[in-house]
């Protein structure tokens, strides 16, 4: 069974930095993109950043210039480096991946989600 496991959330002061990591495990045939979305209380889930296996990055407008995404394709991991954090970055951050699970090969690519990790930016 494919799982996405996040790590690295926590409490940080405004202007600080934090790194989130996510590892995809299970019998994975292929991964298209991996990345992160976030959801703040009372708001819809929004794109933070995604990165395809070919190196194409998509960043949310609110994090451009502050957040960087990277992947290790061999290890099926994705990392989000967050800098110059603001209180409005406070949210639950969800790892996501568009991948083919060997157990459901015929279904092709499907989107998977992690359980989420809390990031709180506060003084």
Image (cartoon, helix red, strand yellow):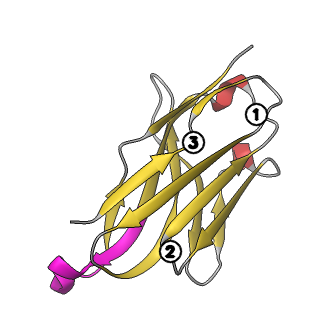
Q: Horizontally, is 8 left or right of 30 in the view? A: right
Residue 117 point in image, percent of width and height: 47, 37
Whichever of callouts 1 and 3 sits on the residue coming sooner in the sequence is 3
Q: Horizontally, is 9 left or right of 42 in the view? A: right
User: In percent of the image, x 52 and y 81: which residue is there?
Assistant: 74
The residue to which callout 3 is attached is 8
User: In percent of the image, x 78 and y 24: which residue is there?
Assistant: 14
CA separation in Å, label 2 and label 3: 18 Å
Q: Which type of secondary structure does the marked residue at label 1 adopt? A: loop
Residue 116 point in image, percent of width and height: 42, 41
Q: Horizontally, is 5 left or right of 93 in the view? A: left
Camera-near label (1 vs 3) is: 3
Camera-near label (1 vs 2) is: 2
The residue to which callout 2 is attached is 75
User: Which residue is at the front of the view, 11 or 57?
Assistant: 11
Q: Dots 1 and 2: beta carbons under 8 Å? A: no
CA separation in Å, label 1 and label 2: 28 Å
User: In percent of the image, x 76 and y 22: which residue is there?
Assistant: 13
Disc 3 crowd, CA 10 A, few/some/many (<14, 14-19, 20+): some
Disc 1 crowd, CA 10 A, few/some/many (<14, 14-19, 20+): many
What's the magenta region?
97-109
Quarter assignment of residue 119? top right
Tag on residue 85?
A: 1
User: Which residue is at the front of the view, 67 or 75?
Assistant: 75
Queried whether the magenta region covers residue 19, the answer comes back as: no
User: In percent of the image, x 60 and y 70: which residue is there?
Assistant: 71
User: Which residue is at the front of the view, 74 or 95?
Assistant: 74
Q: Dots 1 and 3: beta carbons under 8 Å? A: no
Whichever of callouts 1 and 2 sits on the residue coming sooner in the sequence is 2
């Amino acid at each position: 069974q494919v799982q996405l496991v996040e790590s690295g959330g926590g409490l940080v002061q405004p202007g600080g930095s934090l790194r989130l990591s996510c590892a995809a495990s299970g019998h994975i045939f292929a991964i298209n993109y991996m990345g992160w979305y976030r959801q703040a209380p009372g708001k819809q889930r929004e794109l933070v950043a995604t990165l395809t296996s070919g190196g194409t990055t998509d960043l949310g407008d609110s994090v451009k210039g502050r957040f960087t995404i990277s992947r290790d394709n061999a290890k099926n991991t994705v990392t989000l480096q967050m800098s110059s954090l603001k209180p409005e970055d406070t949210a639950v951050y969800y790892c996501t991946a568009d991948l083919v699970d060997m157990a459901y090969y015929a279904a092709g690519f499907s989107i998977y989600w992690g359980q989420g990790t809390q990031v709180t930016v506060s003084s």
